[in-house]
Image (spheres, grey):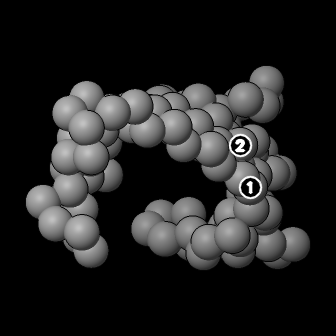
């Protein structure tokens, strides 16, 4: 469970969902290919006016995780999100970016 940030903070009060991640070793115990997905629902505030009440989102990410030491790792992901609701939303494009 996380709190929404950015432009959606005035409309949605909570982001609820679950995620799964799988790490595939590329170089044993040093470099991993990561693949993760989730199912998330944005919970709307009652006073907000929006065409989409509670959007359901499916983010898909792929990346690399590098472990330079035992207690630290560096990770870069590239991915996007798909809005699963059929109702038109104020955000009608899939976003892609580095995490």
The answer to whether marks 1 and 2 mark residues whose Cβ atoms lie closer than 8 Å is: yes
Q: Quadrant of the N terminus?
A: bottom right
Q: Which of the 4 image quadrants contains residue 4?
A: bottom right
Q: Residue at x 62, y 44 (%)?
A: 20
- Residue 79 is situated, as x and y percent measured from the top left of the image, at 39, 34
Answer few, some or many: residues within 10 Å of disc 1's Cα (few below 14, many 20 plus, some between 14 and 19): some
In the rendering, at what x and y percent does residue 46 appear?
Answer: 87, 72
Q: Is residue 98 left or right of residue 48?
A: left
The answer to whether one can see residue 64 in this image is: no
Q: Can you say whether 14 is above or below 73 in the image?
A: below
Judged left or right of residue 8, residue 65 is left
The residue at the point 56 percent across, 63 percent down is 8
- The answer to whether 25 is drawn above or below residue 44 in the figure is above
Report x, y in % for residue 53: 83, 51
Give the residue furthest to the front: 28
Residue 71 picture quarter: bottom left
């Amino acid at each position: 469970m996380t709190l929404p940030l950015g432009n959606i903070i005035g409309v949605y009060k909570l982001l609820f969902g679950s995620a799964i991640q799988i790490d595939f070793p590329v170089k044993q115990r040093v470099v991993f290919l990561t693949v993760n997905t989730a199912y998330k629902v944005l919970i709307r505030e009652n006073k907000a006016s929006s065409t989409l009440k509670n959007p359901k989102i499916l983010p898909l990410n792929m990346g690399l995780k590098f472990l330079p030491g035992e207690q630290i790792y560096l990770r870069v992901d590239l991915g996007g999100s798909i809005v699963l609701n059929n109702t038109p939303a104020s955000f009608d494009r899939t976003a892609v970016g580095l995490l």
